[in-house]
Image (cartoon, grey):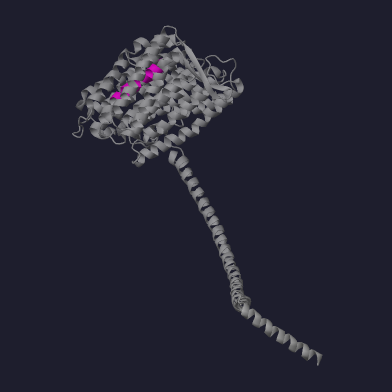
């Protein structure tokens, strides 16, 4: 469990470091990738000795998350870790003078972690989660130079086409869970799923693995930095579709391989022709990637997941090497167009040597790793129920592969050396990654067969396949070296080069409708805004009327208040001048009477006697008057 945590968390922690601190982000990402590679190697050797394990932990109700450690998962994990580690080594030099380093290092490290999670996912829900993170990181990486319009458009194109195709994955997973009652990924299913569910999964594979008609997003994605192209388009993102197909193949009904083989075969031929007539080295490699993934899908359709797995592993090393070489020339010439790279191979001979070895290996020349994997696909075609389709298409695809790789080598070597090609800064880092990757191309064939057999798959072999494949490879290399396809000016070549646009292509079928839909939504939004604005204006008017009425009411109340205040003031004056005045006068009279009484009742005896005499006199006078 410790090894598995290191595999998943080492690049994830490096991603967080690069996100919050750009200081030494490249070296931290390289350290995280190296630690993940070390843990993956130790886990692979442990599993090779018979170890296996599975962990379940809380997920959705009744659908727990699951991580499985099997030989197949650890083998794929080791390949991804090796390729990722060497590409990070290369990227330290490549990104030395590039902008957007923080975004690049954070996204590429998270991408590696999510790819490892996808490989070890033991249930379909966790698989979909990892699939989504891959798509998100792909968008960020392709748009590393987001300030460039072309990079943003390329990222949008990859995102939109993959979003559309991913609906197939969601529907297929939903069908699997409904039909089985479980989200676990099993090696042998007790029952097959419906044809609708299987075709939905195939639809998702077509998008992620850039199969016809979704192949154009991969060519557009070349606007991202070359390390992104080397990683996404070799052993990781596009390979996720093949991993999905290998894991879901036991669930397919007997009728399903026909549809799988048809998609793979059509893609092999159509994108192979696109690669032949490409005028850009990275776009040629992108078209080649679609074609090689078509070989893998063709092998699965022929019933040999072992042959598909072998070519998946071999292609990871070969195509990564080719992209790394192309990136060195891109930095040296400032362009990826063939007209700018003519003769570049003679300027940077070490780079050309590594590129040439990988090109010849992809064509299927022994003793390189591509020879063994390509022969396995040809042999699987011979053993299939429709050899006239599977074998013939695989043979024609081998011929096309040799032609476009030889043509590229001819342009790089035979063309006039341009003075604009210089040794880029960080060349040692880049060439170190390239050389180590080429070593795996040279010696990987020694271990390929045993790895496939140990994983529980069969890698077919047939003398006829070996001989015919070698003849096709040699013929294609000869034709590609001698012919001059760039001089063909027929309109059909532009049609092939531009990925077979129908009805105006991606811009007419996707971009224009989306823009029109956006414009319609904008008009609806504006009308809704105007409607809400009118309602607001009406409410304001009503509020103004209410406010005026309120002011009038307020004035009336204020008038009544003034009257009340006047009455109160009058009442106050009345009280002060009337009642209060009368009371004050009575009180004053009483006080005067009291003072007078006080003077009369002085307490002196002689005065009291006098008053008594005068009282008796008054009383006598009153009695006399009354009697008269």
Res. 161 in view: yes
Main secondary structure along the magenta-highlighted residues:
helix
Q: Does the magenta stretch include residue 613?
A: no
- Vertical arrangement, residue 500 with respect to residue 577, above or below: above
Quadrant of the frame with the N terminus = top left
Q: Where is residue 347 in the image (x, y as percent from the top left)?
A: 20, 27
Residue beneath the point at 53% across and 54% down: 527
Res. 593 in view: no
- 475 relative to 53 in the view: left or right: left
Q: Where is residue 493 in the image (x, y as percent from the top left)?
A: 37, 34
Q: Does the magenta stretch include residue 88?
A: yes
In which quarter of the view is residue 473 placed?
top left
Foreground residue among 445 and 434: 434
Foreground residue among 407 and 261: 261
Part of the protein shown in magenta: 75-89
- Vertical arrangement, residue 203 with respect to residue 585, above or below: above
């Amino acid at each position: 469990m410790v090894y598995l945590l290191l595999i998943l968390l080492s690049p994830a922690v490096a991603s967080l470091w690069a996100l919050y601190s750009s200081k030494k982000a490249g070296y931290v990402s390289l350290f995280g990738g190296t630690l993940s590679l070390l843990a993956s190697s130790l886990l692979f050797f442990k599993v090779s000795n018979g170890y296996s394990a599975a962990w379940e932990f809380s997920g959705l109700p009744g659908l727990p998350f699951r991580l499985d450690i099997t030989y197949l998962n650890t083998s794929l994990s080791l390949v991804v870790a090796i390729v990722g580690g060497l590409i990070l080594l290369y990227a330290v030099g490549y990104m030395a003078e590039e902008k957007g380093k923080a975004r690049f290092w954070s996204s590429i490290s998270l991408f590696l972690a999510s790819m490892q999670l996808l490989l070890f996912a033991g249930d379909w829900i966790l698989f979909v989660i990892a699939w989504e993170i891959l798509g998100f990181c792909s968008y960020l990486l392709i748009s590393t130079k987001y300030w460039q319009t072309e990079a943003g458009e390329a990222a949008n194109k990859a995102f939109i086409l993959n979003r559309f195709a991913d609906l197939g994955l969601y529907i297929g997973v939903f069908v699997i869970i409904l039909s089985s009652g479980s989200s676990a990924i099993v090696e042998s299913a007790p029952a097959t799923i419906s044809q609708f569910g299987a075709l939905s999964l195939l639809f998702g594979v077509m998008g992620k693995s850039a199969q016809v008609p979704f192949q154009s997003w991969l060519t557009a994605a070349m606007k991202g930095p070359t390390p992104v192209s080397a990683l996404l388009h070799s052993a990781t993102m596009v390979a996720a579709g093949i991993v999905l197909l290998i894991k879901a193949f036991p669930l397919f009904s007997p009728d399903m391989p026909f549809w799988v083989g048809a998609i793979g075969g059509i893609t092999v031929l159509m994108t192979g022709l696109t690669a032949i007539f490409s005028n850009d080295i990275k776009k040629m490699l992108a078209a080649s990637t679609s074609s090689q993934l078509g070989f893998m899908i063709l092998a699965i359709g022929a019933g040999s997941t072992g042959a598909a797995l072998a070519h998946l592993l071999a292609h990871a090393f070969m195509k990564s090497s080719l992209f790394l070489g192309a990136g060195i020339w891109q930095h040296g010439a400032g362009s990826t167009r063939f007209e700018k790279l003519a003769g570049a191979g003679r300027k940077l001979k070490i780079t050309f040597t590594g590129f040439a070895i990988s090109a010849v290996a992809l064509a299927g020349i022994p003793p390189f790793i591509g020879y063994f994997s390509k022969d396995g696909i040809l042999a699987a075609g011979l053993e299939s129920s429709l050899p006239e389709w599977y074998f013939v298409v695989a043979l024609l695809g081998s011929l096309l592969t040799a032609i476009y790789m030889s043509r590229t080598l001819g342009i790089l070597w035979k063309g006039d050396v341009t003075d604009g090609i210089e040794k880029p800064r960080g060349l040692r880092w880049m060439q170190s990654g390239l050389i180590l990757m080429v070593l795996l191309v040279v010696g990987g064939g020694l271990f390929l067969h045993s790895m496939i057999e140990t994983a529980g798959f069969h890698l077919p072999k047939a003398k006829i396949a070996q001989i015919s494949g070698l003849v096709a490879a040699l013929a294609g290399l000869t034709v590609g070296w001698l012919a001059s396809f760039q001089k063909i000016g027929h309109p059909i070549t532009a049609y092939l080069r531009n990925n077979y646009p129908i009805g105006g292509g991606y811009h007419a079928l996707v971009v224009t409708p989306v823009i029109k839909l956006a414009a319609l939504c904008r008009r609806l939004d504006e009308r809704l805004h105007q409607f809400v604005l009118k309602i607001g204006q009406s409410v304001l008017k009503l509020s103004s009327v209410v406010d005026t009425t309120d002011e009038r009411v307020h004035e009336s109340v204020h008038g009544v208040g003034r009257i009340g205040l006047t009455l109160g003031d009058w009442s106050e004056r009345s009280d002060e001048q009337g009642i209060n005045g009368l009371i004050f006068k009575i009180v004053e009279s009483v006080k005067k009477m009291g003072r007078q009484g006080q003077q009369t009742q002085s307490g002196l005896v002689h005065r009291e006697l006098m008053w008594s005499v005068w009282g008796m006199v008054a009383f006598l006078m009153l009695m006399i008057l009354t009697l008269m």
